[in-house]
Image (cartoon, rainbow, N blue to C red):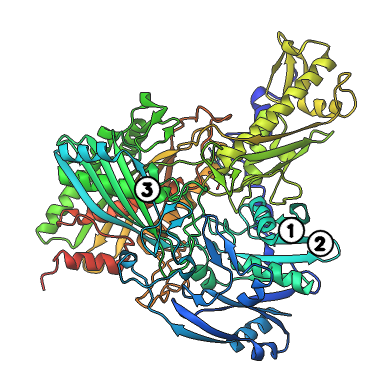
Amino acid sequence: MNDLTPTREQREAALEGMGCKRKRVEDVRFTQGKGNYVDDLKLPGMLHGDFVRSPHAHARVKSINGDAALKVPGVLAVITAETLKTVNLAWMPTLAGDVQMVLADGKVLFQNQEVAFVVATDRYAADDGINKVVVEYEPLPPLIDPFKAMDADAPVLREDLAGKMTGAHGPRKHHNHIFEWTVGDKDLTDAAFRKADVTIKEMISYHRTHPSPLETCQCVCSFDKIRGELTIWGTFQAPHVIRTVVALIAKLPEQKIHVISPDVGGGFGNKVGAYPGYICAAVASIVTGKPVKWVEDRIENLTATSFARDYHMTTEIASTKEGKVTGLRVHVLADHGAFDACADPSKWPAGFFNIVTGSYDFPTAHLSVDGIYTNKAPGGVAYRCSFRVTEAAYCIERGMDILAQKLGMDPAELRLRNFIKKEQFPYHSALGWEYDSGDYHTAMKKMMDTVDYAGLRKEQAEKRAAFKRGETREIMGLGVSFFTEIVGAGPSKNCDILGIAMFDSCEIRLHPTGAGIARVGTKSTGQGHETTWAQIIATEIGLPADNIMVEEGNTDTAPYGLGTYGSRSTPVAGAAIAMAARKIKAKAQMIAAYKLEVHEGDLEWDIDGFRVKGLPEKAMSMKDICWAAYNSVPPGMEPGLEAVSYYDPPNMTYPFGAYICVMNIDVDTGVYTIRRFYALDDCGTRINPMIIEGQVHGGLTEAFAIAMGQEIRYDDEGNVVTGSFMDFFMPTAVETPHWETDFTVTPSPHHPIGAKGVGESPNVGGVPAFSNAVNDAFSFLGSTHIQMPHDFWRNWKAAKNLGVFAA
Ligand code: CDP
């Protein structure tokens, strides 16, 4: 070896493989304004569509008159439900087994529901046309309060379901009932409660909010009449699923549908489902033969596309007096809005909410969920969480704090006493999951040591005493949260969408010069897949990550995948990428053996190529093997180096984390100060620590928003009162706290590279940390539970209700 021969460390560093803080390759275009988003697409002759929307939450539509709109210069068509009926598209199936109006058919069921679609030569003409469409409504009583949905005299919302007492998920109890879902052992759980020394019961609401990606939902549909082909560019998190759904509902041959997701400006679950805009733009393009663009504005996005949460969870925990939990009983009233358009795997009407036992060793548990209709927008998407997991984490993490308060025990101590122990993994939860791996005690203790938990509690005690003496008007809260996520939907044994198993896929094709392309069935909406997928390949096959181009989002080129949501990309597609790379490596080994004139078994892998065991100077780099694959493969072997993998995971992955929020609240104004937020995440093997940190920062910022103010709120008439960023809390750098991140590494035993998902963990763990901090601050004044969101006004009101004002 001379001085110029790279060392092993240098060879490894040159790959920028797993574990490297590789800079995001996509940022080169994003930071220069050179991204390519749907709205950047301008096709010759392109038309624009826009919606007439309902001002009422519940009303009969007596007539729609588009005559005046058609006289507006540039307006070409006014499409109504009657038009769509001619092509059998007035209603569309939802992912949850319900049906949903594409355009109002006789009735409107939520404010801003789509009533008519105006097509024009430009966006402005379409907007002018909308204002000229005359709709005659007969208002009906709106149903807004979910707790009144199943009253005997509650208005009938879904007249189309009249007489149908069975839905997609079993029997319906009432005309506004969608489903009841139960899991767990009721008798055993009831018995645990009868025997318990201590029990708690609290109605814990997780309010309605919205993913609100900066880029709203949009599409361009272009139908080629000669070829009979429909091309759809859209903001889709799951382009292949969209292609199949369009094929099924529009009855077009699937090979003649091309779905392309270009760069997407944030998804967070909002861009999983199918919206009326897509159907209307496609129909308009088929009718006119011209490309049609539909781009929603912010108000439309917030008020009409998929909301998140709206779960009202009556939570009961049974415990011994020493603080060992013995049973969990949860009933959820789930407000699904006007149509059941939840984006969950088909067999899971409440998603994976049955992860609600959290990180604790509950011997028994019982869960029941009632889904109901109200006059609100449909949806129920996993806003930066795996299906309903953030609701579950909030439920159990608030519940544990409430139990600690009743027992007079420290909340961290209660958690340590009840954690599933390291040696219990793989762990079977009382509600049916098999947790793959975890080391909760280590993570919790690391968090407590790092922040000096004991010191913070001491300071809090002193502050409380000072408050009681009237020396300060500030109270202090410590919000502890320990969450277990369930990500990587999922194993075909229990996860499908419309009957399609939730595998994911990767195709890798290496070129002669030692470069290549990887096409993956996922779709990055900002998570940096172009960067990290190449890192997995770099480590697996020893070519620099810079040599691998990653492509996603084109259904004609990418292998069929189920898309990106629920932090499934790394657990499922990440595994497919590693498996495809391993197939390539196996072929590469045969080529190397042939070229080096040894038996395959005599070779060993060495960072970026194969070498002969015991003869390190006799080696062949992966770069040279790529060349050989195109000119001198062993006799009988096909030339080329490419492989495809469709990966059906054996289990989900279970990332976890220990978070703490330290907060001060001024009781006279309700103004809070986040003094410190520490987040320890364990996502198994870490592909790119810098991207993980970015994911955690983003998720925590959303958690902060949700817990401290972000809300889709309705008045009694069903008007959305938080329909723009003036009212819907979207934190900027000014409000956002400083985040401290940390980690432990507990690899997944079943994932090829040991990685678990991470993108959603901070939202799942962050919300309870904030809420627990507020609740912990007020607890010494006699409060048990204050509902989110905890904005200044609500904090002030909480203080007022607790009587901390002298006047
Ligand atoms: O499905 P989604 O991409 O939203 O979530 P994810 O699988 O948690 O991945 C988010 C980003 O974090 C991706 O760029 C992953 O490659 C990266 N990541 C990582 O570097 N290491 C992990 N163990 C998990 C995710």
- Residue 67 in view here: yes
Q: Residues within 10 Å of mark 2 (few under 14, many from 20)?
A: few
> Which quadrant of the frame does ligand 1 lie within?
top right
Please report contact status of discs 3 and 1: CB closer than 8 Å, yes or no: no
State which quadrant residue 735 falls in: bottom left
Vertical relation: 781 (above or below) 696: below
Q: Which residue is mark 1?
A: 252
C-alpha gap between disc 1 and disc 2 = 9 Å
Q: Which SS class for mark 1?
A: loop
Vertical relation: 453 (above or below) 49: above
Q: Which mark is residue 392?
A: 3
Foreground: disc 3 or disc 1 = 1
Reading the chain from its start, which is encountered first: label 3 or label 2?
2
CB at disc 3 and ligand 1 closer than 8 Å: no
Q: Nearer the viewer, residue 248 or 736?
A: 248
C-alpha gap between disc 3 and disc 1 = 40 Å
- Image quadrant holding the C terminus, namely bottom left
Q: Which SS class for mark 2?
A: loop
Please report contact status of discs 1 and 2: CB closer than 8 Å, yes or no: yes
Reading the chain from its start, which is encountered first: label 1 or label 2?
2
Instruction: Please state which amino acid type lies under the numbered disc 3.
Output: Ala
Residue 136 percent coordinates (x, y): 52, 87
Q: Nearer the viewer, residue 621 or 347?
A: 347
Residue for point 42% across, 72% down: 722
Please report contact status of discs 3 and 2: CB closer than 8 Å, yes or no: no
Instruction: Please state which amino acid type lies under the numbered disc 2.
Output: Gly
Q: Which mark is residue 228?
A: 2
